[in-house]
Amino acid sequence: MRRLYSTFATSWPGFGLLLMRIVVGSVVVLTAGPNLWSDGPLHLTLASAPLVLSGLLLVAGLWTPVAGAVVAVIEITQILRVAEHPVVGLLAGTMAAALAMLGPGHWSVDARLFGWKRIESLPRRNSSNAH
């Protein structure tokens, strides 16, 4: 993950990414979740499982590029095939694609697992001062 992003945005940009992740993930889970337990068409049920999982991953900020890409692809294909909620799907897919490109931000599991870490070493003892 670290190779995908040069930094994990902090401050206001990081907060903006957190807000985007929470909104997109929640919308995806709330719209796709009921399809898992309904007697709807099989293609909606099969598309809902990865959508719900990806939405939960986006909220947590875990595997954000993969989860964002999955949401974007499924939402766009559902718009073209089903057109049940085209505006909601278009917005969720577009924002998920943007999250896949921008990254999760500082307040995410990805940043904790894959972010840049600072390692401080102890000062060396000079061997000439040893008795």
Image (cartoon, helix red, strand yellow):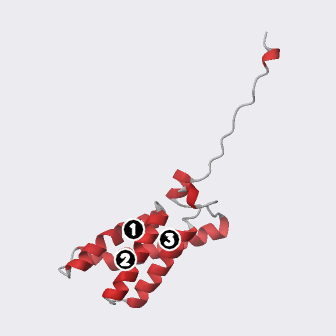
How far is disc 3 from disc 2 in space, using C-alphas?
Answer: 17 Å
How far is disc 1 from disc 3 in space, using C-alphas?
Answer: 11 Å
Q: Amino acid at mark 2?
A: Ile
In the drawing, what numbered circle is on residue 2? none
Residue 80 occupies which quadrant of the picture?
bottom left
Q: Of the two numbered discs 3 and 2 on the same chain, state the one appearing first in sequence.
A: 3
* Label 3 close to label 2 by CB (< 8 Å): no
Q: Is residue 29 left or right of residue 4?
A: left
In the drawing, what numbered circle is on residue 54? 1
Q: Position of residue 71 (x, y in %)?
A: 41, 73
Residue bearing the label numbered 3: 21
Q: Nearer the viewer, mark 3 or mark 2?
A: 2
Identify the secondary structure beneath mark 2: helix
Q: Nearer the viewer, mark 1 or mark 3?
A: 1
Residue bearing the label numbered 2: 74
Q: Amino acid at mark 3?
A: Arg
Q: Position of residue 129 (x, y in %)?
A: 82, 16
Q: Position of residue 109 (x, y in %)?
A: 50, 57
* Label 2 close to label 1 by CB (< 8 Å): yes
Question: Quick check: 125 above or below 32?
Answer: above
Q: Is residue 26 visible?
A: no
Q: Nearer the viewer, residue 74 or 49?
A: 74
Identify the secondary structure beneath mark 1: helix
Q: Looking at this view, name the residue that lies furthest to the right.
A: 129
* Label 1 close to label 3 by CB (< 8 Å): no
Q: Quadrant of the C terminus?
A: top right
Q: Position of residue 32 (x, y in %)?
A: 32, 77
Which residue is pictured at 34% across the width and 90% down the height?
Answer: 83
Which residue is pictured at 46% across the width and 70% down the height?
Answer: 68
